Amino acid sequence: MEKIGILTSGGDCSGMNAAIRAVVRCAIYHGLSVSGIKRGFEGLIQNQLVEMDLSSVGGIINHGGTILETARCLEFKTEAGIKKAVDTLKKHRIEGLVVIGGDGSFRGAHELSAKWSVPTIGVPATIDNDIAGTDYAIGFDTAVNTALQAVDKIRDTASSLRRLFVVEVMGRQAGFIALETGLAGGAEEVLIPEKDTDLEKMCKKIVKGYQRGKRSSIIIVAEGNESGGAFRIAQQIGDRTGFEVRVSVLGHQQRGGSPTALDRVLASRLGAAAVEQLVKGNTDKMVGIISNRVEVSNLDYAWRFQKQTNLSLLRLIEILSI
Ligand code: ADP
């Protein structure tokens, strides 16, 4: 193997640049040259490539987003689209590919590997953290810390005015961001898609809290929560308790910003591990981190198995917020 390609695909997140840097520098260390593919699978179809050298990834470890840019590409899901992508790889003599993204991107990577025999390794990067085969995906820790900063600030206002806030965090159909932000932010309640919430019981607890002298309450709602979005929950709480409820939807700020140390370390380890897997001749694999060790799993594990949310954290939040 002499040359590999690298792309970022799907939703962006902090730490993608640190992963790109690790892949490029580790590949060069192993004597490989590296092509950067712009805008994910779309750039592969449209032949948008840039050569990456040591300095092309200088000064990016601390930046959010992705210097290679990313895209969602419907054409890649078609036979004709994927064939164009394979032609680009052949034209540039690219013998292996590192795909940095979420489970959608891994489905594309799996197609390339299983059906078109392109050696492909996935690096999990999504703020949602909903990828099986890794304890943490790149970008998750930064998203939690961003949400936590916002919750801390909202807490200042909430306790000054004795207010109740409903704060909506991202996470698609998973409650990972909500749970960790809730536990770290001392939230009174956390509503996640993985477990139904008894709103009546929750409201009684909130009222009891104020009766014993609480000056603020913060309810964290995951965006994919079954009981509805933050505004609907706020309305229901207001109707049941008579309290004035404020809503804050944190949104896309959770995706960007300078990555935390944890995300930079994770991205550096996983980026380097992906290159090592290609050098060893492996394909159709994902590198992940389990109990602080780099582990390798089959790419399809990422979407065939549902990553379990640690529901004991909900119980802990319940105990610590009475
Ligand atoms: P993420 O990787 O963040 O989960 P998406 O689900 O949007 O993001 O997937 C990113 C891209 O991966 C899609 O735009 C598409 O190009 C490719 N992709 C997703 N699913 C498939 C599939 N089943 N077959 C081929 N390519 C896919």
Image (cartoon, rainbow, N blue to C red):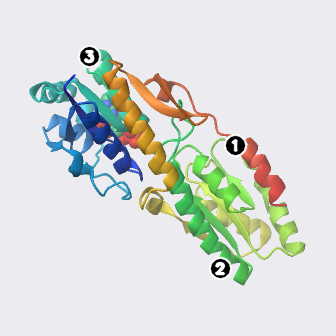
Q: Quadrant location of the N terminus? A: top left
Q: Give the quadrant of ligand 1.
A: top left
Instruction: Check disc 2 and report the residue beneath it.
Output: 157
Q: Position of residue 281 (x, y in %)?
A: 32, 18
Q: Position of residue 284 (x, y in %)?
A: 37, 21
Identify residue type, mark 1. Answer: Lys
Mark 2 or mark 3, earlier in chain: 3
Q: In the rendered image, is residue 89 in sight?
A: yes
Residue at the image position 19 percent from the left and 36 percent from the top: 44
Q: Ligand 1 within 8 A of label 3's CB?
A: no
Viewer-nearest residue: 153 or 71: 153
Q: Position of residue 40 (x, y in %)?
A: 26, 41
Q: Quadrant location of the C terminus? A: bottom right
Residue at the image position 73 percent from the left and 49 percent from the top: 197
Mark linked to residue 195: 1
Separation of marks 2 and 1 at Cα, in angstroms: 29 Å
Mark 1 or mark 3, earlier in chain: 3
Viewer-nearest residue: 245 or 160: 160
For the residues bearing labels 2 and 3, Cβ distance under 8 angstroms: no
Mark linked to residue 171: none
Instruction: Check disc 3 and report the residue beneath it.
Output: 117
User: Is 221 on the left or on the right of 304, as rendered?
Assistant: right
